[in-house]
Image (cartoon, rainbow, N blue to C red):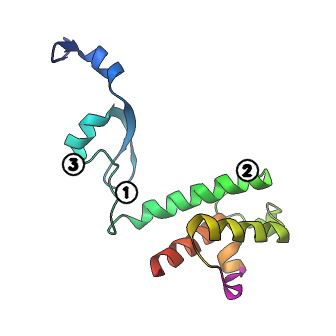
């Protein structure tokens, strides 16, 4: 197959010249291939991945981002590795009671929420999955 030419430049040179980024499917699932950022405008109508802007964005994408931010904080602050989203913080020893206070402080500052004393229950703060659900529901209510 002959290389395609854009404005006199072979495709190989074009690939090196254009920044690349991971492009996602409209459902939020990543594609296995990478395409030039400029082509994303043609494919998706935007260079931003689908569901990342406006008030009508996909809540499933939000909760995934929230989980990733929480896991990064926990790994960096408590040196925990290899834990699942559903693992109990206190039950598995990932975080102790003082660590929960650090976690509350992080959630309040990072996500702009006010955590009330009534919200400090295991149903909200005992795993990444539960905490992400709590954060997402509080953000949605705001």
Q: Nearer the viewer, residue 46 or 109?
A: 109
Mark 2 or 1, nearer chain start: 1
- What residue is shown at x 51% (from left), y 57% (from top)? 65
Please give the residue where the numbered disc 3 appears in the rendered image.
45
- What residue is shown at x 80% (from left), y 66% (from top)? 99
Gap between marks 3 and 1 measured at Cα: 13 Å
Stretch in magenta: 115-121
Q: Quadrant of residue 70?
A: bottom right
- Looking at the image, residue 81 lies above or below residue 88: above
Q: Nearer the viewer, residue 126 or 45?
A: 45
Please give the residue where the numbered disc 2 appears in the rendered image.
76
Asked if disc 2 and disc 1 are in contact, CB closer than 8 Å, the reply is no
Q: Looking at the picture, how far across and down is residue 24, in whole percent?
A: 36, 46
Q: Looking at the picture, how far across and down is residue 95, in whole percent?
A: 80, 63
Element assignment for label 2: helix
Q: Looking at the picture, how far across and down is residue 98, in whole percent?
A: 84, 69
- What residue is shown at x 60% (from left), y 64% (from top)? 110
Q: Is residue 36 magenta?
A: no
Please give the residue where the numbered disc 1 appears in the rendered image.
52
């Amino acid at each position: 197959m002959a290389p395609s030419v854009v404005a006199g430049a072979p495709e190989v040179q074009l690939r090196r010249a254009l920044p690349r980024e991971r492009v996602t499917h409209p459902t939020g699932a990543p594609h296995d291939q990478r395409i030039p950022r400029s082509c994303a405008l043609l494919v998706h109508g935007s260079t931003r991945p689908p569901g990342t802007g406006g008030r009508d964005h996909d809540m499933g994408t939000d909760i995934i981002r929230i989980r990733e931010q929480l896991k990064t904080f926990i790994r960096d602050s408590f040196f925990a590795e290899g834990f699942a989203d559903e693992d109990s913080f206190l039950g598995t020893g990932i975080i102790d009671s003082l660590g929960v206070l650090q976690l509350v402080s992080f959630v309040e500052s990072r996500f702009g929420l006010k955590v009330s004393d009534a919200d400090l229950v295991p149903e909200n703060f005992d795993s990444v999955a539960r905490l992400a659900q709590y954060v997402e529901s509080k953000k949605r209510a705001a």
